[in-house]
Image (tube, rainbow, N blue to C red):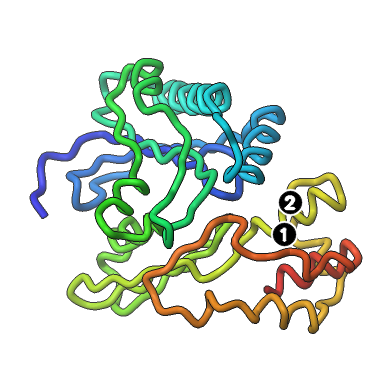
């Protein structure tokens, strides 16, 4: 890979956990990290969080999400501004923003992945050039569109003894296996926090199981767990990736809030 003089880049991420926006600044030459600069995480406000959750639940049937996309994009612009103020930087100090957007639907077997986020609007609002639509571009190139984090993991693992594996648990979980001579294998392993978060919101009103307390108080239902694990996805070879709602939570529908949380955590 060609390398250049390091520039200051700003990355934005909002994952399938739907909990908010992560932003990070770093100096990079395009192949490695020269120096981390600063980071910030800001939760979505309640209205935007609820709107995004509803959109994810109905993504296959949505007629349009222009207003939601605009609100989500401007929320990212607010985070950019906050991070620049935190680091005492002006927009012209940052060469580029990498803007992932918010995934509403991911169906790589059908060649479909849908992230909302208006890169042009973000560029105007932030006064910084923006690169976006990573997942769609990867699918157009014949890839799965996910996971994308392994490229970053490989850079972080540059000086570590190989092989090394990195497990990333978001709404969906994925693993990166990094071998010698730059070998990289990565795929979604299964559900991460999304099913647990959805269960907790539905049964307790809280959008997550804080410190795993609800699951710790429950008991795993072996029958429900076996049914969840009896999914053909786990037998498929990589490359493979998942939608946030790929698994059926109906198998735990009759359980108590505690036992349901325990079973989904075991899953």
Residue placed most toward the observer, 19 or 222: 222
- Left or right of residue 122: residue 254: right
- Left or right of residue 132: residue 60: right
> Which of the labelled discs sits on residue 196, or is there none?
1
Secondary structure type for disc 1: helix
The residue at 35%/16% (across/down) is: 124
Residue 178 figure quarter: bottom left
The residue at 71%/30% (across/down) is: 46
Marks 1/2 in contact by CB < 8 Å: the verdict is yes
Tell me the quarter of the image containing the C terminus.
Answer: bottom right
- Left or right of residue 22: residue 132: left
Location of mark 2 (residue): 208
Residue placed most toward the observer, 8 or 183: 183
Seen in the picture, residue 104 relative to 168 is either above or below; the reply is above
* Nearest to viewer (mark 1 / mark 2): 1
Secondary structure type for disc 2: loop
Q: Position of residue 215 (x, y in %)?
A: 80, 66
Tell me the quarter of the image containing the N terminus.
Answer: bottom left
Seen in the picture, residue 245 relative to 223 is either above or below; the reply is above
Q: How many marks?
A: 2
Q: Position of residue 67 (x, y in %)?
A: 56, 22
Q: Position of residue 161 (x, y in %)?
A: 29, 77
- How packed mark 1 is, by other alpha carbons closer than 10 Å (few <14, some 14-19, many 20 or more), is many
Q: Position of residue 90 (x, y in %)?
A: 33, 18
The residue at 79%/48% (across/down) is: 201
| Sequence-first tag of 1 and 2 | 1
- How packed mark 2 is, by other alpha carbons closer than 10 Å (few <14, some 14-19, many 20 or more), is many
């Amino acid at each position: 890979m060609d390398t250049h003089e390091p520039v200051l880049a700003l990355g934005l991420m909002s994952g399938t956990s739907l909990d908010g926006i992560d932003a990070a600044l770093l100096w990079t030459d395009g192949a490695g990290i020269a120096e981390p600069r600063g980071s910030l995480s800001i939760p979505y406000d309640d209205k935007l969080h609820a709107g995004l959750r509803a959109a994810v639940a109905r993504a296959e049937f949505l007629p349009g999400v222009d207003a939601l996309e605009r609100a989500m994009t401007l929320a990212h612009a607010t985070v950019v501004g906050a991070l620049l103020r935190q680091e005492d930087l002006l927009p012209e100090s940052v060469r580029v923003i990498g803007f992932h957007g918010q995934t509403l639907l991911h169906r790589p077997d059908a060649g479909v992945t849908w992230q909302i986020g208006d890169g042009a609007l973000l560029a105007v609002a932030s006064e910084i050039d923006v690169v976006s639509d990573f997942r769609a571009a990867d699918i157009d190139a014949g890839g799965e569109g996910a996971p994308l984090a392994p490229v970053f993991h490989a850079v972080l693992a540059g000086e570590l003894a190989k092989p090394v594996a990195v497990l990333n648990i978001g709404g969906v979980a994925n693993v990166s296996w990094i071998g010698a001579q730059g070998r990289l294998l990565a795929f979604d392993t299964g559900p991460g926090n999304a099913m647990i978060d959805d269960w907790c919101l539905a049964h307790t009103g809280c959008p997550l199981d804080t410190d795993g307390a609800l699951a710790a108080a429950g008991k795993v239902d072996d029958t429900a767990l076996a049914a969840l694990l009896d999914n053909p996805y786990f037998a498929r070879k990589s490359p493979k990736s998942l939608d946030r709602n790929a698994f059926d939570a109906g198998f735990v529908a009759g359980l108590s809030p505690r036992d349901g949380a325990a079973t989904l955590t075991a899953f």
